[in-house]
């Protein structure tokens, strides 16, 4: 069977199911410049200007054919389009914008290794992603041409982890580590698996969302066999991303014993309404992926048009409280500027607290008192 969609970057407009299912083909045929975007989509003037800016040294473009197929080209406000097609607004800086919003450069303890918490570190294994999201926290360095880091480049990071037994967890990120070749991933996990005091490895990836063809049995076996406890953190932002292909990718991971958690970024014009978030969170749980965080978008330079207020996020979480199951309700989190750490910022349900009585407000708006037990002399 041959598919025909206006998404390829060359004159060829037909391709086989075998090609579509090949993640390397998907990566090779990603849209990467204004010319290929214009062949694929009717661009607005703001999008044309945004795409031209990327060619002048801005944050690059990459959209896989698969992810492009999720875009409704008749809708200029399509939530998939808004995540990946650049706009002229990316040139605008607003108060609070930062080049490195999480202070990762200031918290680098070895090349490609960031430590912002006592017990965990962040390993930046590559600068490449299958798709470049316009709200990316690491737009300062992602796609800069370095690609997957060599093992010799990462060795000082491994040695730092080995010499700090208080480090119990490594988050492997980038870029997207799962767009590296499977043998490369195996080498990194094997090296981490040899460090005895590590309890957990987290793989941070959008591959199930943007290039789900990457998730195959060989990769899943590799993720399972080198470290004792590996968790996969993925990043679905809209229910339209929960396709047949991404559902298969999640199932393959879970069926291989890899727990899947999801971090959703709250984005203006993408998912900043309760119905969209409810559909997304319910859809993830149905597919055995746990909604973990709803993240306030980081104040990355040039992303003001994609961010909401914190008050908006709190209002949305209040709407969802009691409306969806607890396993489908993530924490609403702000990763504080400057790398000071994550802070839960969900709505406040304590309305009063005095004399051992706490007044709580339920999701129905009812006020209920909880009375603390009497303090005995032995309890202090």
Image (cartoon, grey):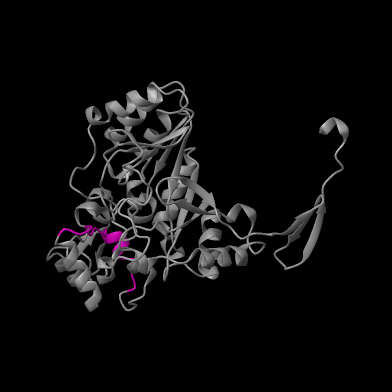
Question: Is residue 66 a member of the stretch shown in magenta?
Answer: yes
Q: Quadrant of residue 326?
A: bottom right
Residue 123: x %, y % from top left: 35, 36
**Which residue: 38% across, 60% down?**
96
The answer to whether any part of residue 225 appears in the image is yes
Residue 372: percent from the left, percent from the top? 82, 47
Extreme residue in the left direction: 11
In this picture, residue 228 sits left or right of residue 78: right
* On screen, residue 44 above or below 306: below
Q: Magenta region, mostly helix, strand or loop?
A: loop
Residue 197, given in percent of the width and then of the height, sits at: 47, 22
Question: Is residue 205 within the magenta segment?
Answer: no
- Whether residue 314 sits left or right of residue 250 in the image: it is right
Q: What residue sits 38% from the left and 48% below the top?
A: 102
Location of the C terminus by quadrant is top right
- What's drawn in magenta, residue-wise? 57-72
Q: Residue at x 41, y 22 (%)?
A: 195
Nearest the camera: 77 or 116?
116
Q: Quadrant of residue 365?
A: bottom right
Q: Is residue 350 left or right of residue 228?
A: right
> x%, y% of residue 156?
28, 26
Residue depicted at x 23% and y 48%: 24
Please say whether residue 290 is visible from this viewpoint.
Answer: no
């Amino acid at each position: 069977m041959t598919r025909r969609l206006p998404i390829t970057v060359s004159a060829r407009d037909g391709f086989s199911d075998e090609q579509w299912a090949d993640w390397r083909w998907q990566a090779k045929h990603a849209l990467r410049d204004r010319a290929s975007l214009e062949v694929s989509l009717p661009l607005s003037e703001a999008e044309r200007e945004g795409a031209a800016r990327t060619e002048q040294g801005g944050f690059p473009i990459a959209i896989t054919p698969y992810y492009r197929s999720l875009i409704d080209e008749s809708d200029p406000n399509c939530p998939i389009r808004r995540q990946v097609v650049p706009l002229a607004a990316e040139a605008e800086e607003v108060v609070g914008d930062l080049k490195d919003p999480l202070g990762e450069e200031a918290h680098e303890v070895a090349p490609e290794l960031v430590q912002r918490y006592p017990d965990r570190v962040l390993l930046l294994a590559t600068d490449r992603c299958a798709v470049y999201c316009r709200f990316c926290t690491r737009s300062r360095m992602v796609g800069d041409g370095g690609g997957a880091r060599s093992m010799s480049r990462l060795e000082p990071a491994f040695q730092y982890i080995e010499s700090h037994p208080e480090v119990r967890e490594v988050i492997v990120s980038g870029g997207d580590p799962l767009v590296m070749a499977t043998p490369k991933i195996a080498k990194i996990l094997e090296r981490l698996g040899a460090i005895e005091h590590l309890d957990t490895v987290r793989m941070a990836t959008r591959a199930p969302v943007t290039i789900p063809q990457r998730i195959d049995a060989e990769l899943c076996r590799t993720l399972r066999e080198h470290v004792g406890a590996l968790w996969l953190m993925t990043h679905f932002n809209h229910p339209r991303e929960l396709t047949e292909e991404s559902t298969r990718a999640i199932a393959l991971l879970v069926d291989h014993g890899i727990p899947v958690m999801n971090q959703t970024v709250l984005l203006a014009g993408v998912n900043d309404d309760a119905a969209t978030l409810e559909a997304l969170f319910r859809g993830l749980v149905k597919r055995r992926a746990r909604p973990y965080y709803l993240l306030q978008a980081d104040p990355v330079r040039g992303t003001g048009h994609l961010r909401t207020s914190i008050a908006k996020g709190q209002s949305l979480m209040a709407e969802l409280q009691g409306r969806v199951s607890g396993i489908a309700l993530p924490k609403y989190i702000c990763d504080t500027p400057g790398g000071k750490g994550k802070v839960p910022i969900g709505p406040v349900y304590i309305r009063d607290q005095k004399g051992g009585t706490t007044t709580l407000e339920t999701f129905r708006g009812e006020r209920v008192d909880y009375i603390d037990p009497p303090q005995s002399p032995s309890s202090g």
